[in-house]
Image: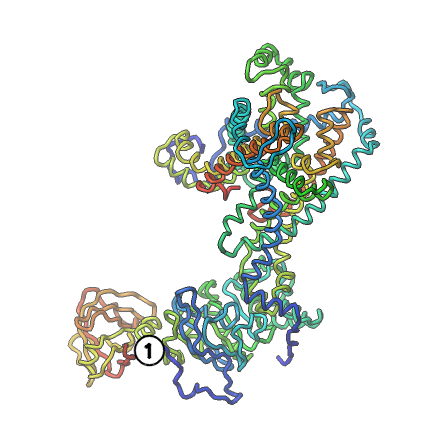
Amino acid sequence: MTVVVTPPQDGALRRVSDVLIARPGLLLMLLLTPPLLWLGVVYLGALFALLAQSFFSIDEFSGTIVYQPTLATYAELLAPANLDIIVRTLVVAAVVTVLAALVAFPIAYYAARYARGKVKALFYLAVMMPLWSSYLVKVYAWKLLLAKEGAVTWLVQAAGLTKILDLWLAAPLVGGPSLSVSYTGMVLTFLYLWTPFMILPLQASLERVPATLIEASDDLGAAPRQTFRHVILPLAAPGLIAGAIFTFSLTLGDYIVPQIVGPSSLILGQAVYAEQGNAGNVPLAAAFCVAPIAIMFVFLALARRTGALDAL
Amino acid sequence: MPSEAGKAPAAARGTAKQAGRSPLGLNLAAGAGLAFLHLPLAFILLYAFSDEDKSFQFPPPGLTFRWFGVAWDRPDIWEALALSIRVALVSTALAILLGALAAAALSRAKFFGRDSISLLFILPIALPGIVTGISLRSAFNLMEIPFSYWTIVLGHATFCIVVVYNNAVARFRRLSPSLVEASMDLGADGFQTFRHVLLPSIATSLLAGGLLAFALSFDEVIVTTFTAGQQRTLPIWMLGELIRPHQRPVTNVVAVAVILVTAIPILAAYYLTREGEHVAGAGK
Amino acid sequence: MIVTEREPTMALDPSPAAATAVRFRGVSRAFGAVKAVDGVDLDVAAGEFFAMLGPSGSGKTTCLRLIAGFDQPTAGHIEIFGETVEGAPAYRRPVNTVFQDYALFPHMTVLDNVCYGLMIRGMGKAERRKLGLDALALVKLVGMEGRRPGELSGGQRQRVALARALVMRPKVLLLDEPLGALDLKLREAMQGELKSLQHALGVTFVFVTHDQGEALSMADRIAVFNHGRIEQVGAPKEIYERPRTRFVADFVGGSNVVEPLLVRRWTGLEGAASLRPEKIFVLADGAKAPDGALVIEGRVEEVLFHGAVYRVEVAAGDAGRLVLSVPAVGAESPAVGAPIRAAFARDSLHLMEAE
């Protein structure tokens, strides 16, 4: 044991390290400032600028923005035509959310409770791939499918169900000239787009339900349906809420799908786009934006309370 | 919905690993759901080879490769593709840097306002894209910044940071504090510890986050339409084609290409992180 | 109550042969209003195998971290071989630590782990490889250089952690509950190995444990911690036979504590006294106690078989509950509920410090 280990070198960097270790607050500040600056200034700043604009109004004749605080724009928001848009969008979002939950649940449940090893990995990939593949491609795919000469119509004809399809299309709310220009088509497309967002948090929640709870419920004499209602469903709720956050948020803000696969009446995203675009009515567009922002904040608050944020 | 015997004693059934076979109804529902998710994409693939170029006729009248050649020759597609890749690369680089810093800061230390700041890092994806897009656009207007490549990057980097942050923070939380102490105990200062111990540990999660951010940026259209001036990224090009189609099958070909390009980073990110509990992309 | 070292052999001798490896003077570490370490004085002699013993929360681990530099004292002065270190970060101190969870770098091989500190110092690859392999041989872990920590057993990982620290030739080696995670047989084997390793190298070892048996068997000297303070420092036998306070009496070896009232009656001295269980002898029926011995009478409450001895709990009237250690070889187990008479020498009572 006669070897001597060379003493450590000193240097400027080492001395900087001394300072940072002795003062963890300084280190924290150095780490946090760049990203915070970015998100805080760029993102939050822009957001507040937008919301500020909702308190301005537009001069009807000149089309320019009048920079004087007023609630007139919000009053305009509450006009029946505009309120209509908001309500309509909320209904669509709600329908999509419920349907997505219904489609997602069996997949999530199977993956959480019964899939093991290779099958589980396969399931995971099977959900990830559609989740991450291009949004536009997916919308486009449905336009193809729903077109009059497209695959869905062909399938319906082959199954001899054409009469039923025509009846459906003739129905007041859900129908339209063709599947690809109707609420039905729009809802279907939204459903297709957002279902993976529902599956993942739901699966994560379900995975956290200990198997022993289900066994205990069985042991105490509950039928499978009761176990589902009283044990599994409540515990999966945070996952459902987390998924709903996504489906709602994404639906409220989307203006592309309705353009491509939707009826002529506007939903919220389109209204925002239209107002700020051609009409140049940024205050109204901003006011329209407040609705989804407010809704999402309520959602996030709810989610935080039920612990759904961890499932995000 | 566990196995058939409702009243059998719990001991006879063991853990969920042997929870009996899943009910047939569940299997069908799950299978149908998955089919629902995957079939439409298969159709796109089919249509890229379709002979018919004026409509979406099904079944397609004939199959051909020629649209691939046509697409290859269109300069506007290549331009849009190049722009998309450039934007994605820069946004991803920025996102990795800023996301890593944020994750390092927020994963452990408890300080006043930490929860609010954590919330801030969820907002860009929790709030609808149109809100982000419009906010940035009106901010740029107000400050009289011209729309350019950089305004696009600004928008993209914002949500890319969130994706990288999510991946990195999960990894940071799993890091054992005694590893940092051990490194310092053996003579490494803060910077050396970062280089030799911390960085290798979080590298895969940063890479995975970066890959996801790349895919996200490459595909993004909503925020981009608001922050781009005259430039067209590939998704914007596609949107234009969807609304006013020129050659439908060419659009299909591009769609197939996009599927492939985004599939690769996703798969790679998955394989990188599947050992940990937190798999990349689980929280988009 | 601060207890400083008073044994004449451990005086603060400035001569190099008896240099002080670690010195604490009035060291405190407060977390808000709570003092994890409260005004501690300590001297660890060079070349010692020193144990810091105490229950969880007693401050022993905090003291170890203060020596290592992972934490800084809120008051007081710390020296390592005469060099002031409080305020200095861990990487500037000539000490190395073996962590409780071993803290091996998972993305490096065993050899890279061991050579890490040398690599940081800038040593060349060939040279540090040689030193690393030597260190691994020293801890009897040969042939594992290429493996990753995840592929090793707990005992093997501990050896790697040990080699990684020793290869740096630290002036003081710190060990944080080193044997806690090992099973009994392995633990006993490692105890012997650590002891002979320390002896061969002559490096000062300071280790933290909550296991008094471990401290007694390995250490040259033990500091017993309680509530952030040291209650007693001394050689194992010293602490075992002559505990200074109730806490030490109870914690180390589970000695009986005789209340001051009885002590005064029996010896005329003031204060509580400790009485070791093995110093009390059972008297057979009718047998007479030796001259000068004190006798107690009572009833057997509980008997536990410990292999070589029976641990017998007796309700002894005024003397309260006393524990006896009765040899089991060739003797029957005392019957629970039966009356029992026992005797002990007067000077078996060790007077403890006034409270």
Report x, y in % for residue A228.
42, 32
Q: What's the residue type where badge 1 is placed?
A: Pro
Nearer to us in this view, C162 or C81:
C81
Going by the image, does A172 lie left or right of C318?
right
> Residue B46 lies in what quarter of the image?
top right
Considering only vertical position in the picture, is B238 above or below C314?
above
- Front in this rendered view, residue A266 or C294: A266
Instruction: List the single residue furthest toward the left.
Output: C286
* Chain name for mark 1: C
Q: x%, y% of residue C244? A: 32, 78
- For residue A206, side relative to residue A153 (left or right): left
Residue B243's spot in the image, x, y percent? 71, 25
Q: Quadrant of residue C343?
A: bottom left
Residue sitting nearer the eye, B34 or B143: B143
- SS at circle 1: loop
Q: Residue at x 22, y 75 (%)?
A: C259
Asked whether residue A155 appears in the rendered view, the answer is yes
Residue in the image at 53% along x and 38% along y = A201
Q: How many marks?
A: 1
**In x, y percent, where is residue A20?**
58, 65
Is residue B28 visible from the viewing direction of this image?
A: no
Quarter of the figure with the N terminus of chain A: bottom right
Q: Which residue is mark 1?
A: C243
Q: Is residue C294 above or below residue A99?
A: below
